[in-house]
Amino acid sequence: MSESTATLVERSQAGDGPARITGAESEHRLSRDQDRLSQPSSIGPNNPNTPVEQAERRARWLGRLLWLMAILAVAGLFLGFQHAYPKDRPVVYSDLEEHFKYGSIGSDRENGLPLQIIRVLPRMFPQYLPDGYKGPLDYRAFGMVYEDGKELPIGFSVRRQYIDLIGLNCSVCHIGTFRRSESEPPVHYLAAGSNTFDILGFFEFLFKCAADSRFTGERIIAEIEKDRDLSLVEKFFLEQLAIPRMQAGLLQRRVKLEYIFQPGYPRWGAGAVDTFNPYKRLQFAADYPHGIPVRERFGVADFPVVWNQDKKRGMQLHWDGNNDSVHERNISAAFGAGVTREGIDIESVQRAMEWLFELPPPPFIAADDIDRSAAERGQAIYRKYCYDCHDFKGSGVGKVLDIGEIRTDPGRLDSFTEKFVEAQKKYTQGYDWSFTHFRKTNGYANMPLDGLWARAPYLHNGSVPTMWDLLTRENQRPERFYRGHGVYDIKKLGIRGDVREIDGRPAWLHDTRKQSKGNQGHSGPEYGTELTDNEKWDLIEYLKTL
């Protein structure tokens, strides 16, 4: 008997073990156990139906099921997040007029600004609004137009990129505001030049806000939540991504456009923009490593009208006639609103163009007051002095008149150069809409006079307030006058130059002595400045009918 067996027997006899086992029985059991060990096991992988294996299998399936449920839950959360916070979805308008007013052209893709932040900035930083402004704390301060019931001005599009972003579209620069007197409400006309919008003042406001030490996530979110509660996701995106990115982007752009804010540089003013020079510091900076040459720096011009686009096919467009393609002209204008070559929405721009093709100019603001007899006499004068250059059927309409002949301010003309033409071509090369029609000219284009009354103030830089003043010798024209208010001079056909404030918003003082602001040119017998006063009044009455 082995030592272990003997010990077991002894313990059993002593009452320390189970039932008493004899030595023979112990040997028999050991032999039986050895026989069992030599047989296939009933426990383990060779028999999957045992309770142990079944339990292990259930555990494995339960683990897989839990993983599947977790994946489905994450996918559901992701799809729900994508629905609530899509990566790239603009607000779309089926109506073409609404699309022109609020539809995206792509500027809200790469240069979009967070809607929630934009909405509260005038409240947070009223000290950066125009000096003397006493109106609502919103973007009316810069001459933007709000429709009743709308929280954003005309010209702001909205795009969802996890959060709502706003961008500028065509209408921000093309909606005119007019009123017959300070006491009457304004009327607004789409496709006119935005005669009240101070675009440089708007961007300067954003730059100053971004540079302020109070431009922080905590303060901005607190201001937003005065209007509505933000979700945790919205707070995260605003504080961690949107606010820092917006601030950095604005400050970088401010540095690139530093030259505009230097002392002595002429401010653009309400209704005006330096059309091409900002491109030279933003999109085309590599082509101007030493900055913009002095002669090119001052290219301020008024926002033009954009109605009757179909009638302008084949004309030399832009103030200096540098492009004869309506399609290209409109795409280049979209760049002025902030689109990039990668982000431009060509289809959306084309929809806006479609609406503008057949859009007529608005009738004269005081059409019932036109002296029809005087207008009839004035028509003959128009035929003699204006028809050839400015009528749709005239031989010279839409063609460039040499600067030596027209003699108007050369700033806008000088700002657009051969070098800039090449930069445009290089920048857009390879795109279906690439620029191929731009060219350098040596003068200004003869514009048609459709809707002439709503084009005031006159000349390419808005330096002459009324048609009466334009028919006056250049040395007798007003040297300084107020604009940006939209109050109309019914008799003289233009804007009143003495209105200093409207609706709590200061008007803009246009000083013709400043660079690119001159009111010279378009003067002499061939331009009607030597007509008698009666002939001028008759001509003006007829021009009101166009």
Image: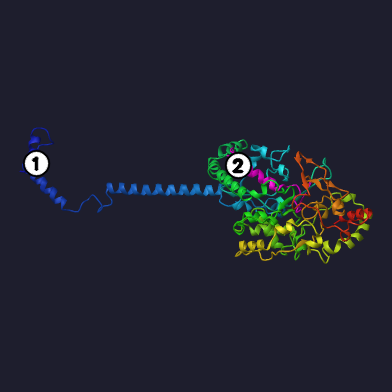
Q: Residue furthest top?
A: 15
Residue pointed to by mark 1: 4
Q: Identify the secondary structure beneath mark 2.
A: helix
Q: Of the residues shown, which amino acid type is indicated by label 1?
A: Ser
Q: Residue furthest left?
A: 1
Density class for disc 2 (Cα within 10 Å; few <14, some 14-19, many ≥20) is some
Q: Identify the secondary structure beneath mark 1.
A: helix
Q: Earlier in the sequence, mark 2 or mark 1?
A: 1
**Residue range (magenta):** 187-215
Residue drawn at the location 66% of the way across and 45% of the way down: 204
Q: Position of residue 86 (x, y in %)?
A: 56, 50
Asked whether residue 229 is in view, the answer is no
User: CB of mark 2 within 8 Å of CB of mark 1?
Assistant: no
Marking on residue 211: 2
> Image quadrant of residue 223?
top right
Q: Nearer the viewer, residue 310 or 118?
A: 118
Asked whether residue 501 is in view, the answer is yes
Q: Position of residue 436 (x, y in %)?
A: 66, 66
Marking on residue 528: none
| Residue 248 shown left or right of residue 481 in the figure | left
> Image quadrant of residue 292?
bottom right
| Residue 520 shown left or right of residue 290 in the figure | right
Q: Nearer the viewer, residue 360 or 192?
A: 192
Q: Position of residue 59 (x, y in %)?
A: 34, 47
